[in-house]
Amino acid sequence: MYLATDIATDALVILKLPSIDLRHDPDYLKRFMMEEWVARRINSPHVLKPCTVTRKRNFLYVVMEYVEGQTLTQWMIDNPAPEIEVVRGIVEQIAAGLGAFHRMEMLHQDLRPHNIMIDKAGTVKIIDFGSTKVAGVVEAVPGEDGREMLGTLQYTAPEYMLGEGGTPRSDLFSLGVMTYQMLTGRLPYGASHATARTKSQFRKLKYVPAPDDNRAIPVWVDGAIRRAVQPDPYKRYEVLSEFLFDLRHPNAKYLDTASVPLLERNPLLFWQGLSFLLTVAVLVLLARLYGGP
């Protein structure tokens, strides 16, 4: 990827060339060629736009608009403790871009901080479409069964790692993980999500609540994020708008934390309490056994 100047317009553009290491990989080349095709069919201020190429192409390349700013990855480094309202604004803009994909029956499939740009005006854009799946377009799906994992594991929905097909809820999972990371600086399941490969392993994942001693995150915001990143896609929100609404408006069922098992709310406290009770039980049994008649 290179920063270049269009000699016809004198505008700065991004020139993207195929990877030298993958130039003989037909699946990679299919995805590369699909990237511009996808970009030309999406019209959103929150999705990177392709540049019009009027001259004859003598080799394979893609020209995209240049966004002066920083990736969400760098933004999180520069803003380790952002206000919730700022995070909401970023999430809503990403969701607007995702919505443009979904309306065209496309799944992004590789939503992660490195693929999000924030320009100097604060506009957020999705910038990479190399993993996008287009409904009914076989060429957009690598391999014969279309089940190759293309995303970054920390943000990839479990159904992909189980070899199942994705849905808009899969992109929502990735958005939920990024929302959690922006607010906490952590991942909702730690490192265990990236190593899980079976349904049993995903069922055993323990969500780490976002609120802690250092961050005043409302429990109802945490409840919305928890639902968005559920390992089971059918337990997530059906549409992006529901998630966005719950990020701004307290949902009554997330205010009643007593209805959530302690094991899910605070796994560490649960196991500490269980260990204490077992220790007491053992001491009582020993006392009865050796305490005489």
Image (cartoon, helix red, strand yellow):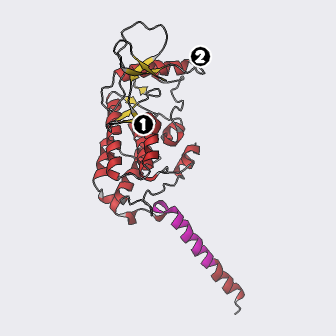
Decide: is 136 above or below 232.
Answer: above
- On the image, the x and y values in percent for residue 230 come to 44, 48
On the rendered image, what quadrant is the C terminus found in? Answer: bottom right
> Given contact means CB atoms under 8 Å apart, are the residues at marks 1 and 2 in contact?
no
Q: Nearer the viewer, residue 78 or 172?
A: 78
Which residue lies at the image location 35% right of the left edge and 38% below the top edge?
94
Which badge, 1 or 2, is on the more N-terminal residue? Answer: 2
How crowded is the residue under tag 2: few (<14 C-alpha within 10 Å), some, or many (20+)? few
Q: Is residue 89 magenta?
A: no
Q: Is residue 269 magenta?
A: yes
How crowded is the residue under tag 1: few (<14 C-alpha within 10 Å), some, or many (20+)? some
**What's the residue type where badge 2 is placed?**
His
Q: Which residues are magenta?
A: 263-281
Q: Quadrant of residue 56?
A: top left
Q: Which one is closest to the eye, mark 1 or mark 2?
A: 1
**What's the residue type where badge 1 is placed?**
Gln
Note whether residue 16 is visible.
Answer: yes
Q: Which residue is mark 2?
A: 24
Q: Which residue is mark 1?
A: 70
